[in-house]
Image (cartoon, rainbow, N blue to C red):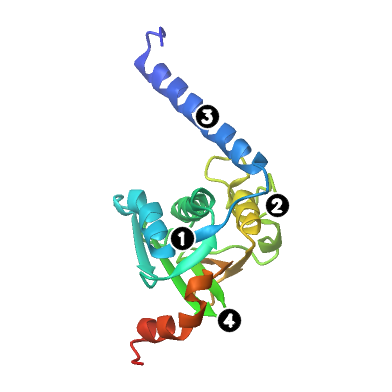
Amino acid sequence: MSVPDAEARDHMVADIEQVDTIIDKFLDYARPDHVTLQALPLAELADAAAAPFTLRDDMQVQIDIPPELRVMGDDVELSRVLGNLLENARRYGKTPGTGVTRVRIAATVRDQWVTLRVRDHGPGVAPDVLPSLTRPFFRGDSARTAATGAGLGLAIVAKMVQNMGGSLDLSNSPSGGLMAVIRLQQAPEQRGGSSLLKKRRTGGTS
């Protein structure tokens, strides 16, 4: 901080912050595989993860999750999963010609599993690159990996979802953009009410 040049100091601070973020990514990826699952309010977690992004002028986030829906997961890991996907979309999922990233987060329930979709409206990813996106340290031509440049962002997402007993699939949406599809177990106390959740989501009546 004793460097007299203000611009040089700013660059040094930015570099230090980037290194710190990359180290955090390594620590996230190196965390033990075992987690304790609990029933979590999915809509609340999605709202909290999206909050910092909705304050930006260059990002719009739409959340379509029934407020009563609960999934089995770890609150820290699921929050980081959502945060990593949103940050990845912010960096690489801008709608062509607009400079703005539009993301939709939605969830549906079927057969005791919750399917969570996080989709942007950007340029998507080359089909031959898709299978490698969750590989640690992979850097595709589109640089659609970690926002920090560590190449771990999507690898961390895949690992954390797996730790919670779920699955992650990445694909290009037919109408454009990258879509992350996460499957997690529905909380046991809600499984008998899956049909009610579906009716509420679609506007049906019991």
Lower sequence index among marks 2 and 3: 3
Q: Is residue 83 left or right of residue 183?
A: left
Lower sequence index among marks 4 and 2: 4
Q: Position of residue 100 (x, y in %)?
A: 36, 58
Please name which of the two marks, 1 or 2, marks the residue nearer to the observer: 1
- Mark 3 neighbour class, 10 Å CA radius: few under 14, some 14 to 19, many 20 or more: few
Q: Answer with the quarter of the image where residue 200 lies.
A: bottom left
Mark 1: amino acid? Leu
3D distance between C-alphas at marks 4 and 1: 18 Å
Lower sequence index among marks 1 and 2: 1
Mark 3: amino acid? Asp
Query: Which corner quadrant holds the C terminus?
Result: bottom left
Residue tagged by mark 4?
111
- Mark 1 neighbour class, 10 Å CA radius: few under 14, some 14 to 19, many 20 or more: some
Instruction: Say whether residue 146 is visible.
Output: yes
Residue tagged by mark 3?
20
Total of numbered circles in the picture? 4
Residue drawn 50% across the image and 81% down it: 192
3D distance between C-alphas at marks 3 and 1: 29 Å
Q: Position of residue 50 (x, y in %)?
A: 38, 55
3D distance between C-alphas at marks 2 and 3: 22 Å
Residue tagged by mark 2?
135
Foreground of the two, 70 or 25: 70
Vertical comparison of 45 with 194: above or below: above
Q: Is residue 146 left or right of residue 206?
A: right
The label shown at residue 40 is 1
Q: Position of residue 193 (x, y in %)?
A: 45, 81
